[in-house]
Amino acid sequence: MTTPVPYQVVRRDSETADTATVALRPVGAVLPSFRPGQFAMLYAFGVGEIPVSVSGITPTDQGLAHTVRAVGAVSGALYGLRPGSTVGVRGPFGTAWDLPAAQGRDLLIVAGGLGLAPLRPVVADALAEPVDRYGQVNVLIGARTPDDLLYRAEIDHWSVARAAHVSVTVDRPDDRWTGEVGMVTTLLDRARFHPPGSAAFVCGPEPMIRATARELVHRGVPAERIRVSLERNMRCATGHCGHCQLGTVLLCRDGPVLGWDRAEPLLAVREL
C-alpha cells in the first residue's frame, strides 16, 4: 500500500512521560491484516511519516494499536494525537515473529525498553492459546527506570494468566522499587525453559539484543529459533530507497524480524 489510508484514533493511553499507545480504527478503506512483528508507516498530516511497529491487533474490527515515543517532529505529533484525530496508515510491511512455528516449545519473550511494544501482541497471542499449545511461557522485561515501564496493568495480568512466568528488572531503581535490578539477561536464571526445546523472541536496543541472543545460544537455544527485531532508518518501506540496508538485507522488506543465525553475521560487520 503506497497511499496512506485514514484511520481514526479511538483511544489514547499514556504509558510514560513521553510515550503513549494509540488505538486506531479504519475510517473507510481497510488495510490487509497485520501480523505481530510487522510495522506500519504512520503519517501525521502536515508533518511527515515514520515506521511504527504494531503493538496491538484486533481482527474483529480491523483495529491497530501503536506505541509511540516522542523523540522528533513526526513521533511528537503522533504522540500528541487524541481520540477523534485522524492519521494516515500504510502497510502492512516487513516480516512477522511467526509465533505459530514455536508450537510445542517453551517460549522466551525478552524485551528491553520500547522493545516490549512489538512483542506485546506475541504475549497476548501466546496467553490466549490453550495451555497445551506451548510449553512454559516466559516474559522477561527490562527497563531503564521504573517510570519507563510500559503496559504496567497488563504486566500484572500476564503474571497471573496461564501460569506464565513474568519477570521485570530495571537498570536504575528509585526508592519505591522492590524488584530486580540489572540487565534483562540476568532474568534468564529464573526463567523456566529447556534450551534445546525453546523458541525465543527478542526486541530492544541493539546491545541488549546481542547480549541476550548470545546468552541464549550459550545456554543451548538454537540460533535459528531465536527471532530478533532490528531497527534501521526506514523511509520508503518498500525496499527501494536503501536507507535501511544492513549488509545484503533491506530491513523494511526482509526484516525487521530475522533469525539470529541470519542477524548475527550482519551485526558483526562494523559500519563506517
Image: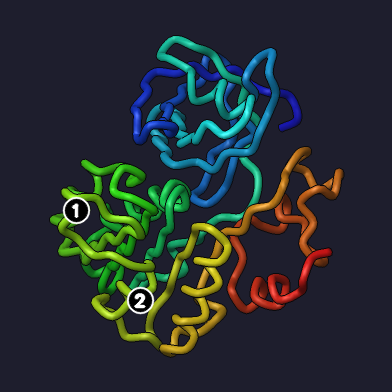
SS under mark 2:
loop
Q: Based on the displayed image, in which of its 4 quarters is residue 199 positioned? A: bottom left
Q: Nearer the viewer, mark 1 or mark 2?
A: 1
Instruction: Look at label 2 and name its amino acid.
Output: Arg
Number of numbered discs present? 2
- Say how the picture is coloured: rainbow
SS under mark 1:
loop
Q: Position of residue 230 (x, y in %)?
A: 61, 58
Quarter of the rendering occupied by the N terminus: top right
Question: Which residue is at 58% across, 29% downward?
Answer: 75
- In the image, 65 versus 29, the foreground residue is 65
The tag on residue 105 is 2
Label 1, residues with CA under 10 Å away: few <14, some 14-19, many ≥20: few
Q: Where is residue 256 in the image (x, y as percent from the top left)?
A: 63, 55
Question: Which residue is at 43% across, 27% downward?
Answer: 22
Instruction: Look at label 1 and name its amino acid.
Output: Trp
The tag on residue 177 is 1
Q: Based on the displayed image, in which of its 4 quarters is residue 162 positioned? A: bottom left
Label 2, residues with CA under 10 Å away: few <14, some 14-19, many ≥20: many
